[in-house]
Amino acid sequence: MLKKVLFSLSYLILFANCAKDNPHINVVCELVPNGTYLIKWETFPPLEGTVRIYESNRTDSFNLNSPIAEQSIDAGFQRVLAMPTSSRNYFKLVFNKKHSIVTTERTIPMQDVFNFRDLGGYFNKDNKQIQWGKIYRSGSLAMADKPDIGVLTRLGIETIIDFRTERESYLFPNKFKAPHVYNLPLRGNRHDIFFGEILSQKMKREDILAYDQDVFSFVLENNADYFIKMFDVLLEEKNYPIVIYCSLGKDRTAIASALILAALDIEFDVILDDYLLSNDLINYRSLVRNADMYPYEVQETITALFRAHRETIKYSFDLLKANYGSIDNYFEKELKLTSRKREKLRDILLYSN
């Protein structure tokens, strides 16, 4: 799995638009079962020399006088035993004392909360990296048990943005109590209304794909007031760290995440990779009772219902561009997200160096 992520995801590319004599560096960090971190990297073109690894429990502060490991770049990986911390371990890799990148594990293990992950680490068009540990995206926090609440507490979560409807919030209240909670019930149909049609095989996989495209476009076009409020929350530095979530974390949360990344000038291919990562983190069989007992055709449609589809987000963003001329125009006209506000958002969420 680690190899697949390392070679297939483009979101950790450093210096993507730099001059040709500067390297591209891909880094992946995973916490492995024995309690160590496995950090792997690739450089393009291949570099010779040394990579030094520094560790901190803060995302923006490293003691560069004390590396915890030093390795030849061509080795391609290093295992490190993380220092004990009540929060989280972050690592800064410095290649040949020139090129640096901060990394940690993207997916944070939870017991009952699924699809919980960090939106940090991505590089934008100006080669600025999103800070780790500032903003997380997740499936429903109503599923959190005591260990999950402990994880959220250790992450220091200050603010929750809940995109679920009022009915969802009433039936499944959030179990984690953050200092600040904003309920922004995004308008748009929910998947659960289709189970009857799916079980009777009146609704097929291709119908789900068409529906998802329509819903994403509807959400983007009919929730400007809620997205304006979301960015108002994000523009207050005191609100961090922040968790945004809905029911599964793959639709409403995915749209909000895509908008946040786009506002930070993250390339669309990177946004797409982040969106599709939900497919590795949602097991619909654990959510649908007796799922394996349904006919194959029904299982195929249910699978489509719970998956993130490349065509969906591409279609909705292409439609935005067609309707507004560009995503930037959509931010300006619909979400009142001016260039000054976007610059402030970058100051809050991007590493300065």
Image: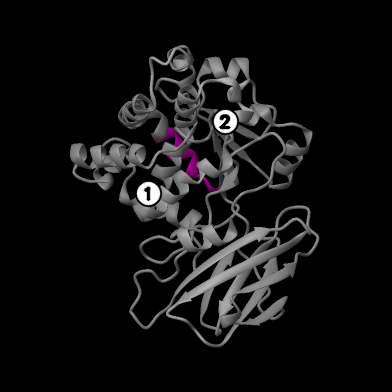
- The numbered dot on residue 41 is none
Amino acid identity at mark 2: Tyr
Residue 231 among those drawn in magenta: yes
Against 186, residue 254 (above or below) is below
Q: Residues within 10 Å of mark 2 (few under 14, many from 20)?
A: some
Where's residue 322, x and y in %?
A: 19, 40
Residue 94, by quadrant, is bottom right
Toward the bottom, the furthest residue is 49
First in sequence: mark 1 or mark 2?
1
- The numbered dot on residue 284 is 2
* Label 1 sits on residue: 263
Q: Nearer the viewer, residue 50 or 232?
A: 50
Amino acid identity at mark 1: Ala
In magenta, the rendered stretch is 228-238
Q: Nearer the viewer, residue 183 or 164?
A: 164
Image quarter hosting the N terminus:
bottom right
